[in-house]
Image (spheres, helix red, strand yellow):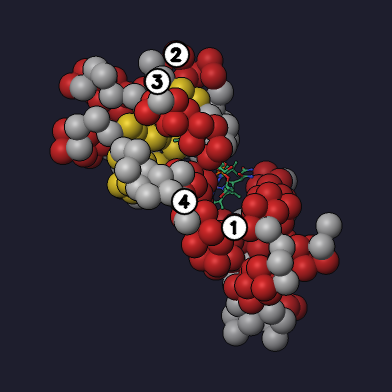
Amino acid sequence: MEPILDKLGEAVEFGKVDKNSPYPPNMKGQDGADELAKEALDTGVEPSSILTDALVPAMDRVGQKFSENKIFVPQMLMSAKAMGAAMNHLKPFFQSGDVKTKGTFIIGTVKGDLHDIGKNLVAMMVEGGGWSIIDLGVDVNEDTFNQTVAENPGAIVGLSALLTTTMANMEEIVKKIKGAHPDTKVIVGGAPLNNDFCTKIGADFYSPDPRGAVEYLNTCVA
Ligand code: B1M
């Protein structure tokens, strides 16, 4: 792997946002995720490689350490911030898709859940795949999803959840949408989900990653 990707992964893992950031103290004065992501792109590393070889594994290490009580929420937040700084540089590459005419994709992280990095990635890649995006943000309830579907007939909905507690809220949201708009397709995703859960709550498709969501959406317009 490119050495720059190792350094970038470390910056995200330890929450070093940019060079001026005083956190973490032992990395003071060093380049952060902001500078390193830009440098990686400038030296020709593929955006997809930056994402899959550096950023996502770094967040996995963060999750692992959190599970083992080696770090706590503030450190996890700094890592999320560093990941966000790197993603800002990748965004234009993931969004430079075809002309946006395939339809509208409404996406949000479900109520009770504040995790938005995966949801943002899905939104970026779907937008890059030629869809208009309505991003409802995080902690979105069934009424907001339902109202947005009513305002955008024919739109497809994407629900994201990262917590085992909040994935349970998806069922209520799917029921509300399908009750009022039975033809609306709903895609679900997020680390704790699987196909069985998708079927159980009456959603149309489960995707473990953004690519699967894009591929499914393309079958809806084929
Ligand atoms: Co939280 N957190 N967190 N957290 N956090 C997890 C999810 C956790 C697994 C960590 C752990 O214990 N190992 C754990 C959940 C345990 C569980 O429920 N089983 C956890 C916990 C417990 C919590 C809190 C409860 C901690 C606390 O307060 N005690 C709290 C909950 C707050 C809340 O939401 N109400 C909390 C808070 C936070 C922060 C705010 C500090 C921060 C989020 C910041 C932010 O998002 N802006 C945070 C972070 C960063 C994480 C970890 C470390 C990283 C998540 C992430 O961004 N991953 C995470 C551990 C982990 O995942 N390894 C963890 C990278 C991202 C690219 O992946 O989001 O999975 P992911 O998205 C993927 C796929 O899932 C998929 O595509 C994406 C790209 O491949 N995907 C979709 C996602 N949505 C999709 C939708 C689709 C299709 C695919 O279609 C619609």
* Gap in angstroms between the C-alphas marked 2 and 1: 32 Å
- Amino acid type indicated by mark 3: Ala
- Residue, disc 1: 76
Which secondary structure lies at badge 3? loop
Q: Is residue 45 above or below residue 152?
A: below
- Residue, disc 3: 203
- Amino acid type indicated by mark 2: Lys
* Gap in angstroms between the C-alphas marked 3 and 1: 31 Å
* Gap in angstroms between the C-alphas marked 4 and 3: 27 Å
Which secondary structure lies at badge 1? helix
Whole-percent x, y for residue 43 in the image: 72, 71
Which circle's residue, 1 or 4, is located before the other in the chain?
1
Q: Nearer the viewer, residue 141 or 48?
A: 48
CB of mark 1 near ligand 1 (< 8 Å)? yes
Which circle's residue, 2 or 1, is located before the other in the chain?
1
Whole-percent x, y for residue 132 in the image: 33, 46
Q: Is residue 37 above or below residue 132?
A: below
Residue at coordinates 19% horizontally, 32% vertically from top-left?
A: 153
* Gap in angstroms between the C-alphas marked 1 and 4: 32 Å
Whole-percent x, y for residue 91 in the image: 50, 60
